[in-house]
Image (tube, rainbow, N blue to C red):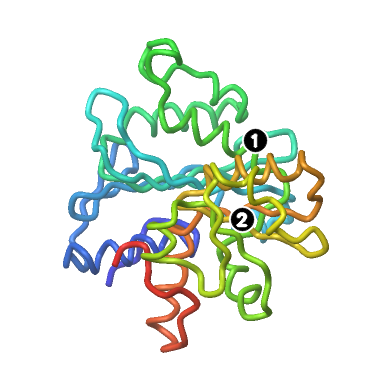
């Protein structure tokens, strides 16, 4: 298998899973002008620094992973797009990695400019990607930047989920009941987001609460609500159940270990 373009381990795991789904093990082409690589019908790129490079260079940085539906722009794919943003304490963008089926060229060019000019998340959140007002067409880049600024609050990475689950931590799933019934973290408590006010007494205040949903958007709303209601030890799970599934699937398969989910998101 050929080496994948310089991306972090978690994003590489997503690409490896996509390889299995498409059956295209090594069929890659590269847009040499932009540095965008393709894997079957998927495209991906890495700009700026990776987490590994920032750690090696001693940088203190934050990261945010988002999964969003690509429905905007001239060629929407209407499929899930994975975006990882690395940024400093003042929200300056240090690196970006992106995977999706859509046309990534415009987003690549904008992010390349932002990195070269040292711009930050606030500017990206407010930037008009396709020349229209944000009210008319908010792109997934805008949404991911907004999300990254929000998740600078307490959160945990998907890599931490297994250890916490095995230690008996309290996981709160705020998806709908049918979503939870189909695929979930084993042992997690399901209270749909719209039921939190009515069922808040079921959530313990004396222990840490780890909140997840499908892609970490509803869970962010839940975390903000709970913190406003006096819950100090509430954490959002970065990447949601989609991110957890990709993280667990790859390592479960490699290590032949016991699953912490009843089934993966994509099964």
* 223 relative to 75, above or below: below
* 101 relative to 11, above or below: above
The numbered dot on residue 230 is none
Name the quadrant containing residue 130: top left
Q: Position of residue 191 (x, y in %)?
A: 56, 55
On the image, numbered disc 1 is attached to which residue?
Answer: 149
Q: In which quadrant will I find the C terminus?
A: bottom left
On the image, numbered disc 2 is attached to which residue?
Answer: 211
* Disc 1 crowd, CA 10 A, few/some/many (<14, 14-19, 20+): some
Q: Is residue 227 left or right of residue 213?
A: right
Q: In which quadrant will I find the N terminus?
A: bottom left
* 125 relative to 41, above or below: above
Report the residue at 64% width, 35% height from top.
Answer: 149
Q: Position of residue 189 (x, y in %)?
A: 58, 64
Report the residue at 81% width, 50% height from top.
Answer: 232
Please name whichever residue, 93 or 200, is drawn nearer the observer in this view of the structure. Answer: 200
Q: Is residue 188 left or right of residue 265?
A: right
Please name whichever residue, 214 or 121, is drawn nearer the observer in this view of the structure. Answer: 214
Label 2: state its secondary structure.
strand
Report the residue at 51% width, 36% height from top.
Answer: 144
How many labels, in total?
2
Tell which circle, 2 or 1, labels the residue nearer the N-terminal end: 1
* 112 relative to 45, above or below: above
Extreme residue in the front direction: 198
Label 1: state its secondary structure.
helix
The mark closer to the camera, 2 or 1, is: 2
* Disc 2 crowd, CA 10 A, few/some/many (<14, 14-19, 20+): many
Please name whichever residue, 37 or 266, is drawn nearer the observer in this view of the structure. Answer: 266
């Amino acid at each position: 298998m050929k080496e994948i373009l310089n991306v972090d381990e978690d994003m590489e795991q997503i690409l490896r899973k996509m390889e299995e789904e498409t059956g295209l093990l090594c069929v890659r082409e590269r847009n040499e002008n932009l540095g965008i690589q393709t894997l079957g019908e998927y495209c991906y790129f890495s700009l700026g620094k990776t987490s590994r490079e920032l750690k090696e260079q001693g940088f203190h940085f934050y990261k945010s992973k988002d999964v969003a539906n690509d429905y905007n722009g001239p060629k929407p794919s209407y499929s899930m797009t994975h975006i990882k943003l690395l940024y400093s304490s003042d929200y300056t963008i240090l690196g970006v990695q992106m995977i999706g089926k859509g046309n990534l060229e415009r987003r690549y060019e904008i992010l390349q400019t932002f990195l070269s000019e040292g711009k930050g998340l606030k500017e990206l959140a407010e930037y008009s990607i396709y020349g229209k007002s944000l009210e008319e067409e908010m792109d997934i880049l805008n949404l991911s930047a907004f999300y990254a600024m929000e998740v600078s609050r307490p959160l945990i990475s998907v890599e931490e989920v297994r250890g916490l689950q095995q230690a008996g931590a309290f996981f709160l799933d705020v998806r709908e009941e049918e979503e939870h019934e189909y695929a979930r973290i084993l042992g997690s408590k399901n209270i749909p987001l719209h039921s939190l006010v009515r069922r808040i007494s079921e959530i313990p205040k004396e222990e840490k609460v780890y909140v997840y949903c499908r892609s970490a958007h509803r869970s962010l709303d839940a975390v903000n609500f709970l913190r406003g209601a006096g819950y100090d030890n509430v954490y959002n799970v970065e990447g949601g159940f989609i991110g957890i599934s990709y993280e667990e699937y790859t390592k479960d398969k490699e290590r032949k270990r016991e699953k912490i989910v009843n089934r993966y998101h994509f099964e």
